[in-house]
Image (cartoon, rainbow, N blue to C red):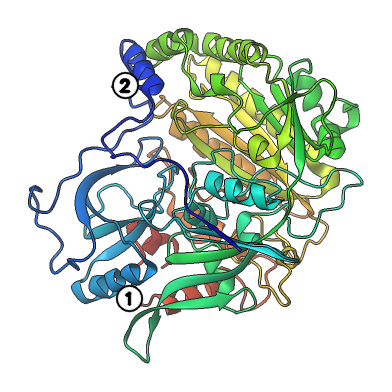
Amino acid sequence: MTRHHDPAPRHHPDEDPDRAHASRRAVIAGAGLTAFGLLQWTPAFRLTPAEAATPAPPGFPSSIPLYQQAFQNWSGEIKVDNLWTAAPATPADVVTMANWAHANGWRLRPRGARLNWSPLVVPAGASGVVLVDTTAHLTAITVHAGSPASVTVQPGATVDAVLAALEPAGYGLTATPAIGENTIGGVLAVGGRGTGIAAQGETLPAGHTFGSLSNLAVSLTAVVWDAGQNRYVLRTFQRGDAEAGALLVHLGRAFITEATLRVGPNRRLRCQSWFNVSADTLFAPPASAGAQSFASYVNSSGRVVCIWFPFTANPWLRVWTVSPNKPLLSRQVTSPYNFPFNDIIPKEVSDLLAQIITGDVSQTPTLMQTQISLVGAGLISTASWDIWGWSKNLLSYVKSSTLRITTTCHAIHTRRADIQRVASEFYAFYKSKLAEYQARGQYPMNAPVEFRVTGLDNPADSQVPGARPALLSPLRARPDHPEWDAVVWVDVVSVPGTPYQNQFYRELETWLRSNYAGAYAAVRPEWSKRFAHTDAGPWTDPAVLAAAIPASYSAGAPAGADWNAARAILSALDPHRVFSNAFLDTLLP
């Protein structure tokens, strides 16, 4: 057994730890992008209770550090000034805070890396809330060797830290979110996942999954209400417990202080980048799709990300394959984040963005072409078009310092045999919709679309007898459609605040739900991103929040294991709604 803490150096929140990023901030500020919030956000100064202009939470436990600081999500679309934040040192401190909050009518919201979009942490205008900073102290990692192997993680540990702890012990994960700075607590809360499905002929080793990271959970420790003691306490739930089904993906309606996840043997991967296949060829209709179709790449490697910049011909196609031995032409890498050009905003891009943001939206096609050209040049200059190494070094490849964007992403459940149809129909609709807006002189989308494929959650991957499925996971299988064995993810990206963006997203969502329906497919939104659009913005459509989304989790589910069952479990574990907010009160009343 080995125990680790996050090895990354800790910085005062007012410091910018990356001098290169600070220099880039100064350059881009000249183009006006800082004012529009397109750079990585640096937290405001911390204020102690004595320095703050507003009263501190009454009677807050004096043993737990408390300070006031602004909150902003990654895209900058949710901003709340002067929220109180606490930094508990232990899970017992979180229990103390929960009982204080219950007694004083306050709420607690777990806060990790802030790399989300949706208001699951706090909505705009939040008050009566104390954020709980999990990244200050709740970062312990313990690797349990053996067969089966596992890792026990506190919520503030990053994905990068977990992968770094697993590698020396000979373990790894099959897929993780591309931004390894995400905290494990945040990833589990929303059913975070990576990219991958079994290649043709591939057998998944024990301890791995093609589903969400939540699907690997063996046990979870949470702060829950104990009616007998009339207080909040710590309780550990095993994967076979009924409550685990709701806690595995809880959307912030619970506070997990520790999770034990199944892990398997580490593997080496090869990642190749391609630009020689057009989008029309990749996403051709099934009847005319050939050897260079999107589905063909998925079948041959299982792990594919296709990044298509609108108004350009050839996407950036990335293909990962399991490769125990180094291919002759690959470059070996020994650390993650091997696409540094992806995290830097060159002057050509910053100049075009400044023009677009200040009103010249006609520059959007030029921006798209410039960006894909710079990606190609970056792959060559960094020799990263064909790289090979341990899984850790291939799975984390986007840093939070990249251009801040806004995005909506949906999981489309379907048959593996229909992957090409799903991707082709989306590509045709999206391309047509862009042309429709362009004809009116409108360019609401000015960033790429990403296509990925994953498997579904299979509780057996946890190697726990009687393991429960994650009831609110976007990758939860539909028992009434066992033939749906794949999920196509479509991630539609744009710069925050672009004119007509909300309207475009609303029309896109409406089409997704109507097109991928019936016996062919079904759609669920990715929790951490934008959904339920009206022209007023995301998360504002009451019919989608109250009906469409709950229905997508209840359709085909057995009695006692649907949306309402998850909601009831979370309410029973936290009847006083200490772990909730105004948005969650609407989504999970």
Label 1: few (<14), some (14–19) or many (≥20) C-alpha neighbours in 10 Å? some
Question: For the C terminus, which image quadrant?
Answer: bottom left
- Residue 228 location (% of width, % of height): 37, 92
Q: Is residue 21 above or below residue 181?
A: above
Q: Is residue 374 above or below residue 38?
A: above
Gap in Å between the C-alphas at discs 1 and 2? 41 Å
Determine the secondary structure under disc 1.
Answer: loop
| Residue at position x 14%, y 69% in the image | 59
Q: Residue 475 sits in which quadrant?
A: bottom right
Q: Which mark is residue 136?
A: none
Camera sees residue 80 = no
Determine the secondary structure under disc 2.
Answer: loop
Residue bearing the label numbered 2: 34
Residue type at tag 1: His
Q: Which mark is residue 576?
A: 1
Mark before the other along the chain sequence, 1 or 2: 2
| Residue at position x 61%, y 26% in the image | 338
